[in-house]
Amino acid sequence: MAPRKTNPEFMTGVPELLILRLLSDREMYGYELVQAIEAATGEAIKVGEGVVYPILHALEEQGCLTSKRKPVNGRTRVYYTATAAGKKRLGALVSEWQRITDAVSGLVKGAKHARA
Amino acid sequence: MPAPEQLIRFDRLRERLLHAGIASRHVRRTLTELGEHFDDAVRDGRAKGLTAAAAEISAWERLGNEDEIVQGVLDRPELRSLPARYPRAISAVGPALLWVTVTIGSGFLVAGISTALQMTGTGIIPAPRTSIEPLWLQNLMNTVLFVYMRILPIAIGAWMAAVFARLHVRSWAFIGAALVSLLSAFSTFSIVFPQVIGEGGELNVGFGAKLEELPTVLMLAAVNIALILSAYWLAHRRLKT
């Protein structure tokens, strides 16, 4: 059975935030990054792993990431890392995410109080 | 070596992405990294005890279906090629602009190199001039000029027409073909070599045609258009099959 995917509409912008967050700590290649996302979110967030590459390439085009090919165990892999612009972007995305989650939490709590 | 199934899937994906206007460098890169990701996923599956076939099925599932990947790339306008972002403007003026830029640019490049060589005392043509250009050099320069004036516009027009065949901007591609064909047919560029030592040569650049030359020039433009549009038609037919 195929793994359950998270609602794509709800997920818009979230992979970007997760990618920038993880690549701000250390450089990673695509496969490693996907595994890190699943590990960091307790597998709560699952997207088609192939869609991580257009996000990485677009972020690099925007100057938020840099990449370099490095040989590892007889194979070469493309490693990505966040730039200063990427870290700044991450800060903006985190603030926006915080604003939305606070608003949704407030609404959910309000609904609970109204029911009680 | 990639399995036949992988080659078929990636070929289909490549065609869909190029057809959708994604820049070829991004298509190449996406497919390379997806292939590496797929290999890693198969290796992981095998390490977990799956058979080779089951590991491949699992790897494809993890990668996501083709539509999802295509949509993921299309959602990123940064990955689209310049012609895909501005198809009308580039298909209409691109060939003519590119031809003029390449022709003038290489003229400046040759002049620059020649000047630099003369300044460092290693000029091909010594100054002061002690002989006229040999015939082979005159023929070579006239051939290069012919390529720039008659072959290059068709090559650029045909190449861009083939690119635009993917983007379905037929009428604008026709305008582009007509523009570069007319511009090159009406342009004149000639070198007059000095026949006597001490005499100066001439470099003539012009645009236009005398009334009596008009039928020949228009015929030349028509042949150029026909050749460029043949390339467009071939590319379009190849895409359909």
Image (cartoon, coloured by chain):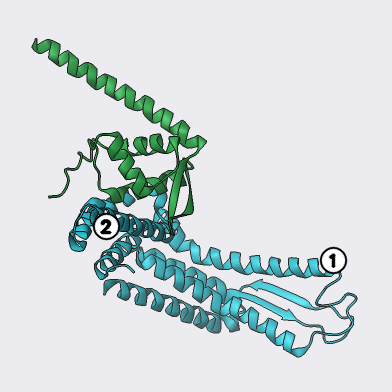
Residue B130: give x, y in percent of width and height: 89, 82
CA gap, disc 1 to disc 2? Answer: 62 Å
Tell me the quarter of the picture where residue B147 sits. Answer: bottom right
Query: Where is mark 1, residue-wise?
Result: B119
Query: Where is mark 2, residue-wise?
Result: B42
Residue A92: give x, y in percent of width and height: 41, 28
Same chain letter for marks 1 and 2: yes
Going from N to C along the chain, the mark reached first, 1 or 2, is 2
In this rendering, the answer to whether B184 lies above or below B83 is below
- Chain under callout 2: B
Residue B219: give x, y in percent of width and height: 50, 83
In the rendered image, the residue lying farthest to the bottom is B135
- Identify the colour of chain A in the image: green
Q: Relative to the observer, which residue lies in front, A73 or A77? A: A73
Tell me the quarter of the picture where residue B168 sits. Answer: bottom left
**Tag 1, which secondary structure?**
helix
In this rendering, the answer to whether B4 lies above or below A33 is below
In this rendering, the answer to whether B42 lies above or below A89 is below
How many marks can you see? 2
Note whether residue A12 is visible.
no
In this rendering, the answer to whether B202 lies above or below A81 is below
| The C terminus of chain B: image quadrant | bottom left
Label 1 sits on what residue type?
Met
Q: Is residue B132 rendered to the left or right of residue B82? A: right
| The N terminus of chain B: image quadrant | bottom left
Q: Residues within 10 Å of mark 2 (few under 14, many from 20)?
A: many
Q: Is residue B214 rendered to the left or right of residue B145? A: left
Note whether residue B235 is visible.
yes
**Tag 2, which secondary structure?**
helix
Q: Which chain is cyan?
A: B
Tell me the quarter of the picture where residue B202 sits. Answer: bottom right
